[in-house]
Amino acid sequence: MSQEQREEAADIVVPGDLLDDSGRLKPGFNTYKEGANIFALRLGVRQMRGDQVSVLALSGRYDPQRNDLIIGTILEAGPSIWIIDIRAPSPVTMHVNDVPWKVDFGETTKYMAPGDTVLLKVAFVDEIKKIQLTMKDRACRKLSGGLVFEVAPSKVPRIIGRGGGMTNVIKTATNTRMFVGQNGVIWIDGEPQDVALAMAAVRKVESEAHTSGLTDKVKQFLQEHRRSGMEQLKRASLEKEWSSWG
């Protein structure tokens, strides 16, 4: 087994797996602590955020966490607020004070209107799960065009990959732009055939998230489909040439 395969396999944990024995980390959600050791409470993906280790369950809805980058859809625009679907149990309100523009009262739709797709950040989540959103971050923006689709939020760490590796593999091989929200919403933009291939690769990662060596499998998948796609283009080009001689 390669180093990459060992690292990928180590990301998946089962109840009782040791997550940390250093005594320096704090237990996060779906974990428990005994002495200096932190263990997994559920089947899922080991996740590090700062000095906290957690387990992201392999099933369930999106559980918002502070500093998450997410993708939302504008549902309504009021005089000074937007109501946004972020795949949480209920829509979330964002005030004009939380965007980087100076928005005059009643002019919210000049900036973001119902149906718009936006890349947002979770600024704060309190103890009763009240969520504050913000776009006052360099990464945040309105997303124009492209294709938006959803995956299980629990599969997002695998789709992003270690250090963004999996997403970079897909983007590079398909020549597309892609944003993966922690809430399981994904935006991809590019040529239609490239977007379709990128989406198919994402679905492969989602369905095989529990397996090891996944990066190599996805690379092979992309190479094979890119090759077959080029062959189809060549055949179509030849058929066009032949028809012009007929």
Image: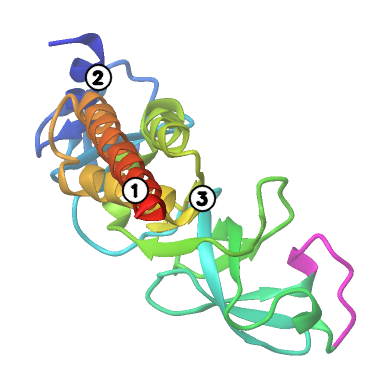
Query: Circle 3 sits in a helix, a strand or a loop, which is it?
Result: loop
Q: Is residue 54 visible?
A: no
- Is residue 133 shown above or below 90? above
Provide residue 90's location: percent of width, then percent of height. Answer: 43, 79
Provide residue 77's location: percent of width, then percent of height. Answer: 68, 86
- The CA span between labels 3 and 1 is 54 Å
Amino acid at circle 1? Trp
The disc, 1 or 2, on the residue closer to the chain's N-terminal end is: 2
Which residue lies under the disc numbered 3? 68
Which residue does the image show at 13% across and 44% down from the upper left? 43
Give yes or no for residue 99 being in the magenta stretch: yes
Provide residue 84's location: percent of width, then percent of height. Answer: 55, 76
Highlighted magenta segment, given as a residue range: 97-105
- Is residue 115 shown above or below 230? below
- The CA span between labels 1 and 2 is 51 Å
Front residue of this view, candidates 111 and 37: 111
Q: Quadrant of the C terminus?
A: bottom left
The disc, 3 or 1, on the residue closer to the chain's N-terminal end is: 3
**Disc sitting over residue 7 in the figure:** 2
Look at discs 1 and 2 and give the one toward the viewer: 1
The disc, 2 or 3, on the residue closer to the chain's N-terminal end is: 2
Q: Is residue 85 left or right of residue 124?
A: left
Look at discs 2 and 3 and give the one toward the viewer: 2
Which residue lies under the disc numbered 1? 242
Amino acid at circle 2? Glu
Provide residue 142's location: percent of width, then percent of height. Answer: 67, 62
Residue 96: quarter of image: bottom right
Query: Circle 2 sits in a helix, a strand or a loop, which is it?
Result: helix
Query: Circle 1 sits in a helix, a strand or a loop, which is it?
Result: helix
Classed neighbour count for the residue bearing mark 3: other residues with Cα under 10 Å, few (<14), some (14–19), many (≥20): some
Amino acid at circle 3? Asp
